[in-house]
Image (spheres, helix red, strand yellow):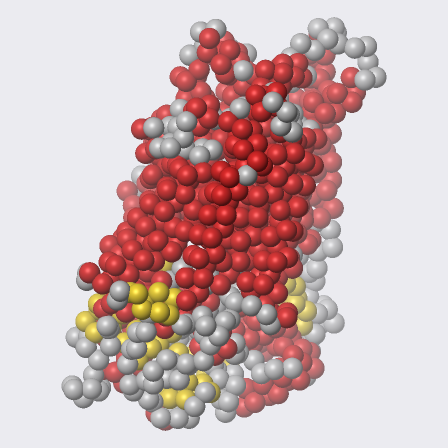
């Protein structure tokens, strides 16, 4: 195994980790605001990828343009999802029942995608899909770079929104202590709805980024939801920086482990990390009070 | 648990019993001379194998249309009863069970994909039915001890690259590749093709530098491609289906890797392949069991009828399904019966000892049902896919080393 | 507690009628296919009843019970195929192995409450799928594993009948175990966990040990169901054995029937199993079954999280003199106030 191969894998791992980080941030938002484990997150991711593919196929425009439609659409869908479905669940059992509910939504999306687009694997055909640039001896595909840039930009925007805006303060307050937030006049229901919308918007962006350089098929979401859930547990349920760091680390480890172990075994790293975390530090490595309770 | 619950349960058991009985109505059966011959088939029309599954369905339909247009089988019309198994082994077994035991079909044809052939062949075996199948090419299908099974294509997966292996091994020393990289999908068929070639090349001293197996639904090939590119192997062989080959090739090109020879199973014969990988197909090799240009008399007729019915020429999946129909029809015509019962054993015995002329050429089988012919090797030449091996049927010259992609 | 004797007598009659209808099924089944469909539905009943040891008593919803199903099936198959163990001994051994395996996994999964537990349960299926696909030397990988028939001399239709009764016996055992726990002090502790784990703990219920025992019992029964399925079906493939969908069917069946009732999961399995079989044969060529499964699950979760039995009971109760309920809704309402 040569040094250049190692470096190449490291670069690939960072690129992959960026996408994981964005998606895990979305999952964390749902959990933070509503204590909901959103199994359908990856299904929405695949749905967005299909929409990007469809836009490209139908109108011949760049799949990135589909973001203009999918991001607002998913945001609204997220708000609606929280207000109309999640809010109906009994608070006593919301964590368990929301898992089942979002699981059901994932099944519906998968089935509907198969119904509309058939089970055939699809891939966006771009004029620049085989193009690459050389960075310090590693070949970096242009499409992967765009996907990473998109993820990094969105993550930064999300970070700024949460830390610098009034809405962000309200959202963090809702995450940290809903009762207290309500006492100081924050409309936690509305904030929770927006939080959900933001989470789903990350799925729209992630899905578009995914469609650039990956094959998509209806049951692809199972391939993503496992690693993503492992990431949010390792990072500590409810902690966005924790999720981002865990995503990056695990993405890189997975990419490097593929060299000696092959793709299948390398994937198990997520689950090993998950079990190890629960045995050693159940609240996750960056989680606080929240994670311990759930 | 209380009275009401228990009562309701009892009612439900009764209702579901009624429902099940109702489902069982309408069984076919009867072998009146005027009755159609019903053929039971289960195919993956949804799920992972839905695309080739639909191809096989078109092939079966083309066969039934052709038979019915020319007076039927034994003077009886042919009727297909096709169920969807969703690419799922539980379903395929339930489907054949219901076709044979409930619908009392006269004949069964095989499903698609090795994974589904073995369980369904066992059902057919246990009901003592002849089982000719269009898609279970992997070696282990024929190692299960089935005595009712016949594969309706020229060769099993491990032998697909035989002509290519001979050609590579026969190259002069200076020209012959030294190292090879293999990447195969974890699927009995796809892996069989690549490993068949690997075994032969290794025996001839060509070193394996990369040997990767990936799960069927892998979408990210950058790591495998990185290893292949890093090894600078002279040749790259992909045991692939369709989309995985496209992804692997794109990933290899992203890394600017240029092999002297690139062979992939199945994918390159797909009409959309060239567009999918975005050009650069020149020199890519693929084995195939079928070509629409083949001069066999029944093939000329098949291509003509198929094109009239579906608007484009058939590919390998359609041809293998059509071949299945031809094989069973030949046995039925020779033996003079088509029904469940001891007729099936006579059909099996007849196929065991005879050769059938089909759209993929004359076929005969060994005791385990392995066909005894070979696959052709195709290569992209001047933008079109042409047969290059074996030399006596070649339409173009075998190009080595291949052009850059 | 009105009409105790009358109620008890009629419930015994209903039980006997139900059992007789079930056990005579292979006799009046019109053809072997219907019998085999009956075996499938019965296996669903076993699985969802097994699931209910955890889901019903403790309220921990495992979406990954397919892991135990797959381990039981592969355990049985591998013991027969690789070690030459006699079929039913292999089944028992596989149950023991899974019970042992379930202890450390249960410890990891149950250290945390709800959300992480569900995540672990799903992760378990996904990781086992990867392992059983990749470890080809041992498991046969994606080529699958062929389990030899335990009764090679039986014809296929006879084979179905024998396994129908074997599944019926296993179902009987699982129901008996559930019934016993339901009436025991142990069961009371488990239900306390379901209603309010913190309070149960502070009242001195050894919550962790109780949860773990329920988890192991549940895993073991699921594994036995899987092992019996392997002996019946004969062909194992990681994709189909470790399938998220099987796990979700178990949850759907149990929830639909009602997780607090002995026969709830069986009822759910009858309804869902027959529906799945019917829809797949009739409308198989679409992805509609996934959508239907998803919608049904969503409807159950949103509108009758306690299942059909309580929903119907609630409906019937309106036409009767009001009984006082001390638990069903009030615990949830109580918690609601505490939480928000």
Residue ID at (32%, 34%): A276
Residue C196 position (above or below residue B128): above
Quarter of the rendering occupied by the N terminus of chain C: top right
Q: Report if residue C27 is visible in the image.
A: no
Relative to A287, say whether A74 is above or below. below
**Residue C115 horizontal side relative to residue C131, left or right:** right
Please give the name of the residue rendered at 58% of the width and 63% of the height, measured from the top-left corner.
A65
Q: Residue at x 40, y 30 (%)?
A: A287
- For image coordinates 68% across by 36% down, the residue present is A83
Q: Residue furthest right?
A: C319
Nearer to us in this view, A254 or B20: A254
Quadrant in the picture for the C terminus of chain C: top right
Residue B77 is situated, as x and y percent measured from the top left of the image, at 70, 74
Where is residue B286? Give x, y as percent.
39, 78
| Left or right: residue A124 compared with residue B214 | right
Above or below — where is B121 with respect to B308? above
Task: Let me know if residue A21 appears in the view.
Answer: yes
Residue closest to the eye, A233 or B40? A233
């Amino acid at each position: 195994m040569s040094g250049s191969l190692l470096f190449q894998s490291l670069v690939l791992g960072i690129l992959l980790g960026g996408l994981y980080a964005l998606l895990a941030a979305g999952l964390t938002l749902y959990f933070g605001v509503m204590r909901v484990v959103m199994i359908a997150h990856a299904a929405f991711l695949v749905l967005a990828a299909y929409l990007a593919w469809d836009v490209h196929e139908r109108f011949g425009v760049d799949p990135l343009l589909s973001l203009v439609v999918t991001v607002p659409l998913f945001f609204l869908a997220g708000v609606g999802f929280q207000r109309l479905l999640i809010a109906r669940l009994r608070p006593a059992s919301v964590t368990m029942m929301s898992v089942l509910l979002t699981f059901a939504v994932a099944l519906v999306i998968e089935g509907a995608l198969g119904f509309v687009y058939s089970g055939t694997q699809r891939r966006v055909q771009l004029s620049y899909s085989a193009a690459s640039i050389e960075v310090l001896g590693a070949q970096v595909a242009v499409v992967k770079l765009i996907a990473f840039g998109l993820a990094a930009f969105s993550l930064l925007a999300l970070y700024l929104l949460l830390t610098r805006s009034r809405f962000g303060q309200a959202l963090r307050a809702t995450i940290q202590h809903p009762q207290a937030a309500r006492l100081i006049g924050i409309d936690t229901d509305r904030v929770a709805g927006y939080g959900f919308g933001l989470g789903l918007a990350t799925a729209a962006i992630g899905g578009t980024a995914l469609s650039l350089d990956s094959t998509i098929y209806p049951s692809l979401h199972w391939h993503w939801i496992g690693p993503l859930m492992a990431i949010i547990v390792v990072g500590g349920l409810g902690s966005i920086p924790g999720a981002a760091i865990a995503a990056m680390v695990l993405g890189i480890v997975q990419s490097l482990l593929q060299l000696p172990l092959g793709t299948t075994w390398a994937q198990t790293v997520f689950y090993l990390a998950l079990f190890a975390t629960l045995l050693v530090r159940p609240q996750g490595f960056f989680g606080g009070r929240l994670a311990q309770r759930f | 648990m209380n009275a009401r619950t228990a009562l309701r349960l009892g009612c439900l058991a009764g209702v579901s019993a009624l429902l099940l009985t109702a489902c069982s109505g309408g069984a076919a059966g009867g072998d009146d001379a005027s009755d159609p011959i019903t053929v039971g088939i289960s195919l993956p029309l949804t799920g992972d194998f839905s695309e080739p599954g639909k191809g096989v369905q078109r092939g079966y339909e083309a066969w039934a249309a052709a038979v019915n247009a020319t007076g039927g089988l034994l003077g009886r019309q042919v009727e297909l009863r096709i169920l969807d198994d969703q690419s799922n082994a539980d379903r395929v077994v339930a489907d054949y069970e219901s076709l044979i035991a409930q619908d009392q079909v006269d004949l069964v044809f095989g499903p698609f994909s090795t994974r589904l052939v073995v369980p369904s062949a066992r059902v057919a075996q246990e009901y003592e039915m002849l089982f000719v199948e269009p898609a279970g090419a992997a070696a282990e299908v024929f190692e299960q001890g089935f005595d009712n099974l016949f594969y309706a294509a020229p060769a099993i997966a491990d032998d697909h690259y035989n002509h290519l292996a001979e050609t590579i091994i026969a190259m002069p020393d200076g020209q012959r590749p030294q190292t090879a990289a293999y990447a195969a999908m974890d699927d009995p068929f796809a892996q069989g093709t690549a490993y068949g070639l690997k075994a032969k090349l290794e025996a001839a001293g060509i070193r394996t530098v990369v040997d990767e197996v990936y799960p069927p639904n892998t979408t990210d090939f950058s790591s495998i491609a990185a290893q292949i590119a890093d090894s600078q192997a002279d040749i790259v062989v992909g045991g692939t289906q369709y989309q995985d080959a496209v992804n692997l090739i794109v990933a290899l090109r992203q890394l600017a890797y240029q092999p002297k020879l690139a062979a992939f199973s199945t994918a390159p014969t797909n009409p959309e392949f060239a567009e999918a990988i975005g050009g650069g197909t020149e020199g890519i090799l693929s084995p195939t069991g079928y070509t629409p240009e083949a001069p066999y008399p029944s093939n000329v007729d098949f291509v003509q009828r198929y094109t009239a019915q579906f608007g484009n020429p058939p590919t390998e999946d359609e041809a293998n399904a059509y071949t299945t129909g031809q094989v069973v029809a030949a046995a039925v015509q020779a033996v003079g019966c088509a029904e469940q019962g001891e007729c099936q054993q006579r059909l099996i015995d007849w196929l065991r000892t005879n050769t059938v002329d089909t759209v993929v050429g004359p076929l005969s089988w060994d005791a385990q049902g392995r066909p005894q012919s070979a696959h052709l090797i195709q290569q992209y030449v001047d933008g079109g896919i042409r047969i290059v091996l074996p030399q006596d049927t070649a339409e173009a010259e075998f190009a080595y080393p291949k052009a850059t992609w | 507690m009105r009409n105790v004797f009358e109620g008890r007598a009629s419930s015994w009659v209903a039980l006997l009628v139900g059992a007789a209808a079930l056990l005579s099924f292979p006799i009046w089944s019109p053809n072997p296919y219907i019998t085999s469909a009956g075996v499938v539905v019965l296996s669903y009943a076993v699985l969802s009843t097994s699931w209910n040891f955890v889901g019903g008593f403790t309220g921990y919803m495992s979406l990954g019970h397919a892991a135990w199903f797959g381990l039981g099936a592969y355990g049985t198959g591998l013991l027969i195929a690789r070690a030459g163990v006699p079929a039913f001994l292999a089944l028992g051994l596989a149950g023991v192995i899974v019970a042992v395996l379930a202890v450390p996994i249960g410890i990891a999964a149950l250290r945390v409450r709800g959300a992480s537990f569900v995540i672990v349960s799903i992760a378990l299926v996904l990781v086992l799928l990867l392992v059983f696909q990749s470890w080809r030397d041992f498991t046969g990988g994606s080529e699958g594993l062929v389990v030899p028939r335990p009764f090679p001399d039986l014809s296929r239709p006879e084979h179905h009948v024998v396994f129908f009764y074997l599944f019926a016996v296993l179902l009987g055992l699982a129901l008996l175990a559930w019934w016993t726990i339901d009436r025991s002090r142990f069961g009371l502790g488990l239900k306390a966990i379901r209603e309010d784990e913190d309070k149960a703990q502070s009242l001195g219920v050894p919550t962790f040990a109780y949860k773990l025992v329920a988890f192991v019992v549940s895993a073991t029964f699921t594994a036995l169901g899987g092992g019996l399925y392997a002996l019946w079906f004969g062909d194992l493939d990681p994709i189909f054995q470790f399938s998220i969908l099987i796990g979700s069917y178990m949850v759907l069946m149990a929830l639909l029937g009602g997780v607090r009732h002995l026969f709830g999961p069986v009822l759910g399995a009858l309804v869902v199993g027959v529906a799945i079989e019917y829809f797949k044969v009739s409308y198989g060529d679409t992805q509609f079954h996934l959508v239907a499964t998803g919608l049904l699950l969503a409807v159950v979760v949103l509108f009758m999280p306690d299942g059909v039995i309580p929903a119907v009971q609630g409906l019937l109760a309106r036409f009767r003199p009001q009984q006082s309920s001390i638990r069903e809704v009030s615990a949830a309402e109580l918690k609601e106030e505490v939480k928000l």
